Amino acid sequence: MPFYLTVTTFTLVGFAFVASTLFLAGVLRPHAPNPDKLETYECGPLPIGDAWRQFNMHYYLYALLFVVFDVEAAFLFPWALVYKQVGAYAVAEVFIFVGILLFALACVWRRGALEWQ
């Protein structure tokens, strides 16, 4: 039970610290509204056009594939440290996991979704 009390106390102190920091930043900051502060910043030159632009859907697909394979790496790194102790059953599970992800990548590749046009 003391472990849960420690974790709960640490969590509450963390939330209190974040809340107090945000509150104090809002109270102590200078209030100087200016319409120029709402403009799009383009590294010095005057902004051209509107800030709302549609991006190519290829970016979305690449970002989604990155997240999938990043999660795969997050699962495989700890497994690689203990694979000698887990046995053949866990090795088979990892091969199935990687196989499913490679199958999904092959399907995306076959559809031509990775080709930049």
Image (cartoon, helix red, strand yellow):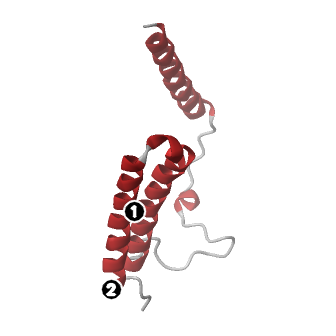
Please name whichever residue, 53 or 89, is drawn nearer the observer in this view of the structure: 89
Residue at disc 2, secondary structure: helix
**Residue 109 seen by the camera:** yes
Q: Amino acid at mark 1?
A: Val
Residue drawn where x is 55% and y is 67% of the image: 40
Query: Which quarter of the image is occupied by the N terminus?
Result: top left
Q: In the displayed structure, does residue 34 sit left or right of residue 66?
A: right
Residue drawn where x is 51% and y is 27% of the image: 19
Question: Which label is found at residue 110?
Answer: 2
Which sits earlier in the primary sequence, circle 1 or circle 2?
1
| Vertical side of 74 occupied by 20: above or below | above
Question: Which label is found at residue 46?
Answer: none
Q: Indicate the position of residue 97 as horizontal and vertical percent values.
A: 36, 58
| Vertical side of 45 occupied by 12: above or below | above
Residue at disc 1, secondary structure: helix
Q: Amino acid at mark 2?
A: Arg
Question: Which label is found at residue 98?
Answer: 1
Using the rendered view, name the quadrant where residue 71 is placed: bottom left
Please name whichever residue, 106 or 29, is drawn nearer the observer in this view of the structure: 106
Q: Indicate the position of residue 73 as horizontal and vertical percent values.
A: 50, 56
